[in-house]
Structure formats: C-alpha cells, structure tokens
Amino acid sequence: MRIVSTMAIAVALGGAIVAAPGFAAKKEDKAAAAAAGKPTPAVQKAAFDAQKAADANDLPTALANYATAKAAIVNDDDKFMVGRVGYQIYQKNKDEALFGESIDLMLASGKASGQAQQQLSVAQGQIAYNKRDYAKALASFRAAQAAGSTDPVLVPAMVESMAATGQTLQALTTLNEQTAKLTAAGQPVPPEWYQRGIAIGYRAKANPADIPAINNATLELSKNWVASDPQKKNWTAALQIYQEQFKLDNDGRIDVLRLMRHAGVLAGDADYREYADQVYLRFPNEAMSVLQEGNSKGIVNLTGKNDASDVMGIVKGKVAADKASLPAAEKAARASASGKGALSTADAYVGYAQYPQAVDLYKVALTKSGVDANVVNLHLGWALALSGDTAGAKAAFAAVTGPKKPIADFWVIHLDHPTIPNKPQA
C-alpha cells in the first residue's frame, strides 16, 4: 500500500519546527513555537540541535540529538516537537522506522492541527498495514475519517484492513455504505472498489452465521457494479458469482441463462450448450434457437460429433409436434385449478417468440393455485422484455420477492443499462 504523500504531510505541518531556546527567533519561528505549545527546555534544546544538524545534512548528529530529545519527553508538547523533528530528519534520510515513530509521536501528542491529523492518521494506517498490523491500521484509518479526511485511499484501506482481520461482513457493509454515499452525491465510484469488495465477499471463509449476510452484501456490490459499468465481462462475472454464492438449482440456472442470452453475455460454447441441455426436454424450440444462435456467432459447432449436435438432432424432430400441441395445452391450462400448466405452456410460447399468448397465460397462472407468484412474475417480465415492453417488464420484475428477487433486479438493471462491449485493457 502506497504511503500518503510526504509533501501533503509537510504542508499540513507547516514551516519551521523549533526556535533556538534563549535566542531571538524569526517571526515565523515564533509562530511555530507558539503553535507547538510549551515543550520542556531539555527537549527544546535537543530538538533545536537535531533540526540544525539536519538542515546542515549532518544526519548522525541530527539522529543523536533526536534520541536525546526523545529520551527527555515529559509532556504532550514534547511529543509533538520531537515528532516534528523526527519527521524533518526522515525527509533527509528516508528511514521508514523513523517516519512511523515520528507520526506516532505527533498523533499521540494531540497537538496536531485538524488537517495534519488527517494526513498523519492516513500515513500511520498505511505504515501499520504494510507491517500487517491490521488492527492498528484500521484504528488509524478510522481516526483519519473522524478527523474529516477525504483521501481517496481511505475507504479501500479501511475495507482491506477489515478483511485482513476477518471482518468480512463489516468490510462489505462499509463499502456498500460508502458507494451509496458517492452515488447519492452524484459522484462516480471507482470500479476497483466494486471489484475488490466482490472478491472479498466471494472468497470469504467466515462464520457460517455470517455467510447469508456476506452473500447479500456481495450481491449488492455486484448489482451496483454492473449498473455503473455494464461491460460484458462484468455481467458474466457478476452473474457467475451470484449463482455460486446462492447455490441456484436447475430452474434458477435457466433463469440466469435466459437473462444472459438477452443481455448478450453468454460466456462461450459452454453456456450455450448448458442452456440447450437444461431446456431441450421441455422446450425444444428454445433449445434449438439457442444452439442456432451460438452456431451463427461461430461459438457452437453443430457439424461435428458432440453433445450440441446430438441435442440439435433431438430437438429438430420434436419442434413441429411440440408447437402443434400448444393450443390444446393452453385450453387445458385455462380449465385447470392449478396454474402449473399455464406457467409451463406460457414458457413454451416464449420459446416460439409468441409473446402475447405467453403474457396472457402468465396472467392466468397468477390467478390459480399451485404456483409461486414470484416465479410467474419473473417469467412474465422475461416475456415482456423480449417483446419490447420494457415498462411492463419492469413492473412485473418489481413484483418479485424472495429468492427470485436478485435475478429480477439484475433484469431491471440490464433494461436500464444495456450491455456494452468490453473496454480495451489499459
């Protein structure tokens, strides 16, 4: 983790550090001495000698006098003065240990200005993080935030520190809160915030009691990520992680594949073949059209001896009879007390791009028993989206609750933020 700019710290601390004790000081030295408070004479003299030696590039003498000043510390004003002198020497010799010690002294004194506290606390946290002292790093970053710091490194640094100490849920909650604040203020969220947070959530090895909340927090980051940057690769990654974290069943996987197809983010031959494998027994035309689409894009090979060719051979012989059976299936579904037939027949109609018939049957299914209204509304939204009725689709998706809600939310995000091609790597 990079350390905060030493120039920023220097600006925050101001100019001269100590005035010569017993001598007439310059106007700016008097102001600096007043700001530093009233250090003890022994500390003031040793600090002055250390500063004078540092100015002359006599670093061994500067360090010896610094050690003398540090050993003589009595009060908070002493701590602040010695810390400032140590920081001046660090600017000459670049001793990271001295840098960290100087920052610790200045912060411990409580005498730093508000701006200096911000810079010093961020730097203290970064030093601690690099030493893998994550508890101290987190405390420092929180102190910087409390002091009013808006340093762009602060949020990711806090999140990384929490994650490193096993506080995965707290890390993701913090990240979601901070991204929401930026979004509400009309400010862009750095893409790496989303990417890092999703990675933390995806790789979490937490207490089982925390897993549902971690998965939901990761899901929230994923949804916001693709809404802010709907590149094809982001969609593919977000939906893959969603499926793995929520352990979707076959029907859930089909729902995801249908969204991926509409969004244009099916990830190669494997997705096309899986899609066809999942639906060909119930919806042969949907399977055939998926395979034909993959073939037309040069992704799926339908000429060789493979499972895609096998499935295509099966569904080609079933499509005509399946399509001819739909009117009778619809009639039976309308007469049934159960909505299962209406739901299944409506799904079949979508596979033939007969969207008006599908939409009507989904609405019939909603009036009957034996079906999950959330599943029906999700599929109704799917049919309406494919038909071009975006407003109607979003209304149907908004009615989805429970385990199906995430995929409905992803559909709405896609409708509001259409997929864009992958951007070239920087």
Image (cartoon, rainbow, N blue to C red):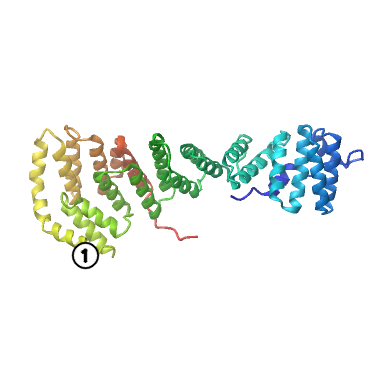
Q: In the image, what residue occupies the spot 17% across and 47% down?
A: 349
Determine the image quadrant of residue 139. top right
Q: Position of residue 373 (x, y in %)?
A: 23, 35
Q: In the image, what residue occupies the spot 86% across and 35% down?
A: 41
Q: Position of residue 261 (x, y in %)?
A: 29, 53
SS at mark 1? loop
Q: Residue furthest right?
A: 23
Q: Position of residue 290 (x, y in %)?
A: 23, 56
Left/right placement of residue 127 relative to residue 15 reads: left
Q: Which residue is mark 1?
A: 302
| Residue type highlighted by circle 1 | Leu
Left/right placement of residue 40 relative to residue 406 reads: right
Left/right placement of residue 209 relative to residue 307 reads: right
Determine the image quadrant of residue 140. top right
| Count of marks overlaid on the render | 1
Camera sees residue 45:
yes
Camera sees residue 30:
no
- Residue 84 vs residue 333, the one in the foreground: 84
Instruction: Specify few, some or many for label 1: CA neighbours under 10 Å numbering under 14, 14-19, or 20 or more.
Output: some
- Residue 378 vs residue 210, the one in the foreground: 210
Q: Position of residue 15 (x, y in %)?
A: 78, 44
